[in-house]
Amino acid sequence: MTALTRDDIVSVLKPAKDTAVMEILATGATREEFIEAYAWMQNDEALLNAGRTLPSGRIGEVIAILQAVEDDEAPGMAPPGEY
């Protein structure tokens, strides 16, 4: 297992917010776990259809962080209370 670095994360998440990078690094995930989490974010349906079980542990933590980043960047979404 290879240690995950800031450069690994930034090379995938462009642009990458420093807070998200720090949160991902804090999970202790390896480079391989980060790549798997990113793959789940890109196409979870294909992985489920291939018989893969839903991720948990560090991969699940990274997915939650990536999902929060994606939700924050959703286009056309007004901040709460601004309609």
Image: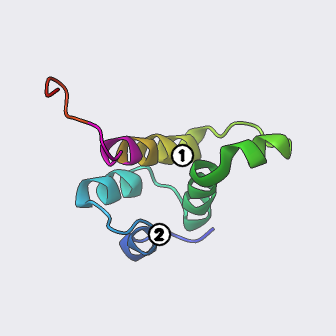
Residue drawn at (42%, 71%), measured in percent from left and top? 5
Q: Which residue is mark 1?
A: 58
Q: Is residue 25 above or below residue 52?
A: below
Residue type highlighted by circle 1: Arg
Q: Nearer the viewer, residue 1 or 54?
A: 54
Residue 69: x %, y % from top left: 36, 48
Residue type highlighted by circle 2: Val
Residue 52: x %, y % from top left: 80, 43
| In this rendering, position of residue 40 left or right of residue 20 | right
Residue drawn at (46%, 54%), measured in percent from left and top? 28
Report which quarter residue 57 is drawn in. Answer: top right
Q: Is residue 8 above or below residue 59?
A: below
Q: Is residue 48 magenta?
A: no
Residue 20: x %, y % from top left: 32, 53
Specify which label sits upstream in the sequence, 1 or 2.
2
Report which quarter residue 60 is drawn in. Answer: top right
Residue drawn at (37%, 69%), measured in percent from left and top? 14
Determine crowd level at label 1: few under 14, some 14-19, many 20+ residues with C-alpha closer than 10 A. Answer: some
Report which quarter residue 81 is drawn in. Answer: top left
Q: Nearer the viewer, residue 76 or 21?
A: 76
Farthest top residue in view:
81
Q: Is residue 73 magenta?
A: yes
Q: Which residue is mark 2?
A: 12
Residue drawn at (63%, 67%), measured in percent from left and top? 1
Highlighted range, magenta: 70-77
Number of marks drawn? 2
| In this rendering, position of residue 33 left or right of residue 50 | left
Under tag 1, what secondary structure? helix
| In this rendering, position of residue 27 left or right of residue 75 | right
Separation of marks 1 and 2 at Cα, in angstroms: 18 Å
**Main SS, magenta residues:** loop
Q: Nearer the viewer, residue 44 or 56?
A: 44
